[in-house]
Image (cartoon, rainbow, N blue to C red):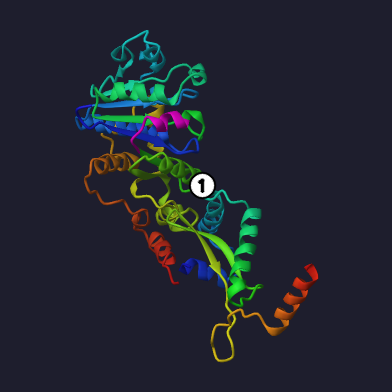
Amino acid sequence: MAKETRVILICSGKGGVGKTTLTANLGIALARQGKKTAVLDADFGLRNLDLLLGLENRIVYTAQEVLEESCRLDQALVKHKQEANLSLLPAGNPRMLDWLKPEDMKKIVEMVSELFDFVLIDCPAGVEDGFKNAVAASKEAIVVTNPEVSAVRDADRVIGLLNSNGIKPIQLVLNRVRPKMMASQEMLSVDDVTDILALPLLGLVLEDEQVIVSTNRGEPLTLSGSNSPAARCYSNIVLRLQGEEVPLIDPSKEGSSIGDKFRRLMQTKIF
Amino acid sequence: MTLRDLINKLLRRQTSSATTARERLQLVLAHDRTDLSEDLLDKMRQEILEVVAKYVEIDMEEGAVSLESEDRMTALVANLPIKRTLSGKIKLKEQTQEENETLKESQSETE
């Protein structure tokens, strides 16, 4: 490989924390900045990345046919309608799981890497074979978690496995943050999660109803340049991913009513 | 502890759920991060205490060996209170006259 392609695994351990949504949004945001980006659905059992990108009707070939050499890579890659810099490599048939090996995954990622600046791999939930295959093909990782005990515990497990596989750097995205609940200490705080997991925080994403609206339409929030809370967070993450320093949104400082101020006062650490 | 926790305590209300979550997570992760079973840890604890007790007098009741995790580093932490003499010196384990005699006795018995 002549150029440095960044191959980033997006994983979480627990399902439903927002891996695929993050992959879709980061992919679009990177492409909008002129980076040639491929998003790769490594979730062969329950693929959804195509749906979130609105590309489900344009799939002809998948990673499976590429590996079987019954089609060329460029035939399988689905170019995004509005963002020509973004391509999706769809996941194959769930039956692929029976024979797919880490080497297959490596091979396919190497092929894709030659054509793109960024390769984002949407990892399946769990820590079984699907996860292991995806890890084998990755260089760095973003661990997505929610401020909830089960998500944090599973993230911890995944971080341990990533560490022992030599994945570096590993960065954290804290998804579905609810500032009000954090302020009233009914939700683990950003510091709680970063202290426990001991990972650098790449960013946090505020809970946002617009995320659901955007998935309904198959148009990631970052596509329309929306200014909704989650869209701003995704954009910041993409900037930080490329080494820019963007200050974190402080969820405890969101809101300026007397109630919010009182909640902040109550959070003061006294000992 | 935060101001809210203090007020909750004074009013004898439950602590905030975030505090409970943090404490529960820290506990469960300390165990998740190691593959040592409770039995193995117990055995190790016992043997460590015995080895140290060969050289200095320690309070066997108070001794504690536990796993502590911080920043993804897990450490085996042993807290073994050493008994002191009245003059403040560490009590070295010296075989007393009595012990020597019983030792000799047992040796002669085996012979």
For the point 59% across and 87% down, the residue is B85
Check the picture and name the quadrant holding the N terminus of chain A.
top left
The part of the image, by quadrant, that contains residue B13 is bottom right
Q: Which residues are magenta?
A: A131-140
Which residue shows up at 55% across the image and 66% down it? B78
Residue A111 appears at what percent x and percent y?
Answer: 30, 21
Callout 1, which amino acid? Arg
Q: Is residue A151 left or right of residue A217?
A: right
Q: Is residue A29 magenta?
A: no
User: Which residue matches tag 1?
Assistant: A153
| Any part of residue B86 in sight | yes
Pick the residue in front: A120 or B64: B64
Image coordinates for residue A174, horizontal then vertical, percent = 40, 46
Residue extending furthest toward the front: B111
Note whether A269 is above or below A138 in the view shown.
Answer: below
Residue drawn at (40%, 31%) of the image: A136
Q: Which quadrant holds residue A159?
A: top left
Nearer to us in this view, B95 or A52: B95
Task: Name the element at disc 1.
Answer: helix
Establish if A207 lies above or below B52.
above
